[in-house]
Image (tube, grey):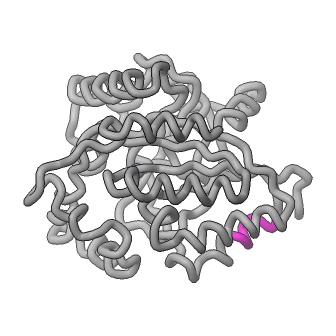
Amino acid sequence: MSSARRILALKVDVDTRRGMEHGVPSLLDTLAAFRVPATFFLSFGPDNSGKAVYQLLRNPRFLAKMLRTNAPGLYGFRTALYGTLLPAPMIASALPGLCREIEARGHEVEFHAWDHRAWQDTLQRKGAAWIRKWFLLGFESYEEVLGHRPRAFGAPAWLLTEEAVGVLREFPLEYLSCTRAAAPFVLEGTGLVEIPSDLPCLEEVGGRDGVSRILSALDAGGVHVIPVHAEAEGGIWRDAFAEILRGASDRGYEILPLSLIAADRRREALHGRPFRTALLPGRAVPCSV
Ligand SMILES: [Zn+2]
């Protein structure tokens, strides 16, 4: 069945220094060419991507995924050494002018991470004190750079824990975009509406060969959020991203910032529930849904 509403939001995650420095400007050009807005979730603190190298040794599925998606081409060789053989450079906080340019060009900037890698790799065993410090460092850096508070938080690797949800409610946010659920809900314990990324990202459908799979998910209409990574869609999959934007436009989609979709959902009586955990197709580790 096809739905009358055809709305798409672009949720752009910036996880690395390379993604910030090179991916973001490239994405800004693509978005300007299509005259569409996006919502950027930035990592402000250190880029410890190199620590992922250890994951290779520990998780064979991760290695398979890295090879399948051409990770060295995606993230670059230096990125693979940050935080190990090379010192970890700061991400968004080192490029304040670029952060403000994102907003000046009509897009939204929200909070994704202080140390993205640390959240992804160690959150499961961290308590409230560590999580609170992680948020405080991140929010402080965000405000210093942008001069106002973020409206939203998007959890790194779409990963939540009970402890993280407990700390989250201490911060004055308007909405969350932390999961890969199929539909929005109110995240129990926070009172905040969660706007999930319901579509797969390019990386999960095999890169540019997967564009048609993403576009066919748009055929039925409705309100959708696609997760985009500055490292990928602002790099080797720049053309594939443009193809998605063209396909969405051909299908009659209006592209809106995530905050508008969240505001719309807050007016509805959404059901509340806790987050769940699932292993999605094309992903190496489970995430929150
Ligand atoms: Zn991320």
Residue 4 visible to an observer of this rendering: yes
User: In the rendered image, which quarter is residue 186 located in?
Assistant: top right
Q: Is residue 123 visible?
A: no
Q: Is residue 37 left or right of residue 152?
A: right
- Magenta highlight: main SS: helix
275 up-or-down from 16: above or below: above
Residue at 77 percent of width and 29 percent of height: 268
Q: Position of residue 92 (x, y in %)?
A: 36, 40
| Residue 202 to residue 100: above or below | below
Q: Position of residue 104 (x, y in %)?
A: 59, 35
Does the magenta segment cover residue 12? no
Compared across the picture, whether 23 is left or right of 209 comes to left
Q: How many marks?
A: 0
Residue in view at x 29 percent, y 70 percent:
62
Q: Position of residue 69 (x, y in %)?
A: 40, 77
Q: Which residues are magenta?
A: 215-219
Residue 270: image location, x then y, percent: 70, 32
Residue 102 to residue 74: above or below: above
Residue that appears at 89% across and 62% down: 2
Which corner quadrant holds the N terminus? bottom right
Viewer-side residue, 207 vs 188: 207
Is 173 or 239 nearer to us in this picture? Answer: 239
Closer to the camera in the image, 153 or 92: 92
256 on left or right of 137: right
In the rendered view, tell whether residue 171 sits above or below residue 113. above
Is 124 left, or right, of 264 in this rendering? left
In the foreground, 2 or 49? 49
